[in-house]
Image: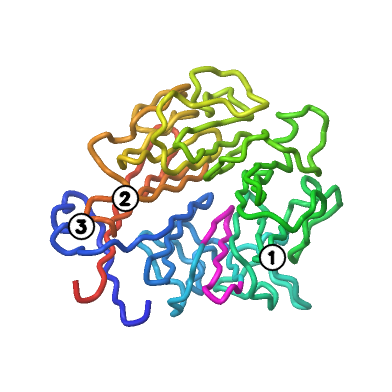
């Protein structure tokens, strides 16, 4: 972070101190990988923490980090994503970079001296027209500014009906691949939105929707055109409409659709009646969503959440007394950014799993504050 010094403090009962020190928001976007976390700050820098066996933190090492470390010296990052032991970032100039494991091509790096792991960011090709990127378990999809959709990693058998892995970005064929405007990756499928506002899926989720094995073709989710945002989990998807309503479809054995049942849904079903949702993310067999009032709600496979229940078919408040700004989730990781006026630089990182929830609060302090 240029001209910016970050002090990192583990907070236990010292949240009040942070209120005195932080005077402006710092976290712009969070990304949760399988066992590591990444944060993009509004100054254009990237920070990461967690497991680092494949260099997925991008700090030129394989040392696990329990407090965030800064990724190189650049201050011009615009978006981030994280998968299973790998990460990606797009810079403001439109170039795409990756770091971490590349064993099945999930970074998209194809060179004569191909390595399995990259411990620091490496540019993916030479194109500088990338708009956004999203990662599944072992594959990644990218959207270019010309509206074309690309994929790489262990995804061809699900998305392209081809054998093997793609070690460099491959253009996704079919359905007039030139008018996409937004994307999201589930574990083994993708969701994409066209200019006309319709949503389409491709990959393993199609088995749930159509039961015909058509994983490598695009299916339209519905005729609706008023979708605002969306995300994918293990085998379910969730989306918010422009009116603030929340919808889900796909597998639902653990209540991950949040509609009060355990029945699978081939088409989007509304999640409770309120229309005040702002952001939603799906991970594994659960879903978390942020309301416009700053409260976070969760449902699905919740044995690792605060109530230690096996699952919940209806949304429950995470902590009704706290207001949040950013959310991100992985199968056993939940990231939340506090949204109180002077606390937007505090990231709550929950290491989840089997009733042994571990909460870490990370305090990031800009220089001169």
**Where does label 3 land, which residue?**
342
**Where does label 1 land, which residue?**
146
Circle 3 residues within 10 Å: few <14, some 14–19, many ≥20:
some
In the rendered structure, which segment of residues is drawn in magenta?
80-95
Please tell me which residue is depicted at 50% across the width and 38% down the height of the picture.
240
Quadrant housing the N terminus: bottom left
Question: What numbered label is drawn on residue 36?
Answer: none
Height in image: 254 above or below 154?
Answer: above
CA gap between label 2 and label 3 equals: 19 Å
Quadrant housing the C terminus: bottom left
Q: With 7 as the anchor, is 52 left or right in this view?
A: right
CA gap between label 1 and label 3 equals: 39 Å
User: Closer to the N terminus: mark 2 or mark 1?
Assistant: 1
Q: With 145 as the anchor, is 110 left or right in this view?
A: right
Mark in front: 2 vs 3: 3
Picture coordinates of residue 223, whole percent (x, y) = 67, 34
Height in image: 330 above or below 106?
Answer: above
Front-lying residue, 123 or 240:
240
Circle 2 residues within 10 Å: few <14, some 14–19, many ≥20:
some
**Where does label 2 land, which residue?**
360
Q: How is the image coloured?
A: rainbow
């Amino acid at each position: 972070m240029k001209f910016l010094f970050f002090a990192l403090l583990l907070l236990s009962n010292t949240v009040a101190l942070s209120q005195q020190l932080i005077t402006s928001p710092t976290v712009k976007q969070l990304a949760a990988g399988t066992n590591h976390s990444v944060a993009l700050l509004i100054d254009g820098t990237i920070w990461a923490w967690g497991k680092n066996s494949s260099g997925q933190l991008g700090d030129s090492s394989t040392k696990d980090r329990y407090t965030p470390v800064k990724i190189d010296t650049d201050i011009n990052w615009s978006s981030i994503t994280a998968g299973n032991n790998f990460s990606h970032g797009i810079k403001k100039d439109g170039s795409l970079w990756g770091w971490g494991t590349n064993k099945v091509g999930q970074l998209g790096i194809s060179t004569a001296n191909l390595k399995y792991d990259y411990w620091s960011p490496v540019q993916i090709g030479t194109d500088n027209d990338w708009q956004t990127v999203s990662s599944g378990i072992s594959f990644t999809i990218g959207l270019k500014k010309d509206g074309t959709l690309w994929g790489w990693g262990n995804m061809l058998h699900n998305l392209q009906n081809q054998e093997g892995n793609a070690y460099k970005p491959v253009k996704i064929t079919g359905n007039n691949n030139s008018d996409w405007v937004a994307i999201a990756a589930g574990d083994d499928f993708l969701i994409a939105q066209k200019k006309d506002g319709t949503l389409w899926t491709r990959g393993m989720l199609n088995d749930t929707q159509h039961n015909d094995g058509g994983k490598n073709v695009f299916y339209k989710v519905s005729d609706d055109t008023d979708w605002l945002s969306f995300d994918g989990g293990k085998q379910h998807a969730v989306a918010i409409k422009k009116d603030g309503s929340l919808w889900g479809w796909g597998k639902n054995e653990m209540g991950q659709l949040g509609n009060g049942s355990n029945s699978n849904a081939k088409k989007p079903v509304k999640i409770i009646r309120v229309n005040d949702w702002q952001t939603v993310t799906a991970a594994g067999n659960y879903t978390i969503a942020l309301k416009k009032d700053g409260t976070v709600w969760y449902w699905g496979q919740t044995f690792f959440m605060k109530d230690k229940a096996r699952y919940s078919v209806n949304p429950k408040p995470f902590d009704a007394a706290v207001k949040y700004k950013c959310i991100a989730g992985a199968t056993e990781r939940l990231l939340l950014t506090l949204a109180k006026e002077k606390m937007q630089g505090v990231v709550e990182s929950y290491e989840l799993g089997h009733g042994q929830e571990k909460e870490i609060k990370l305090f990031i302090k800009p220089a001169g504050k």
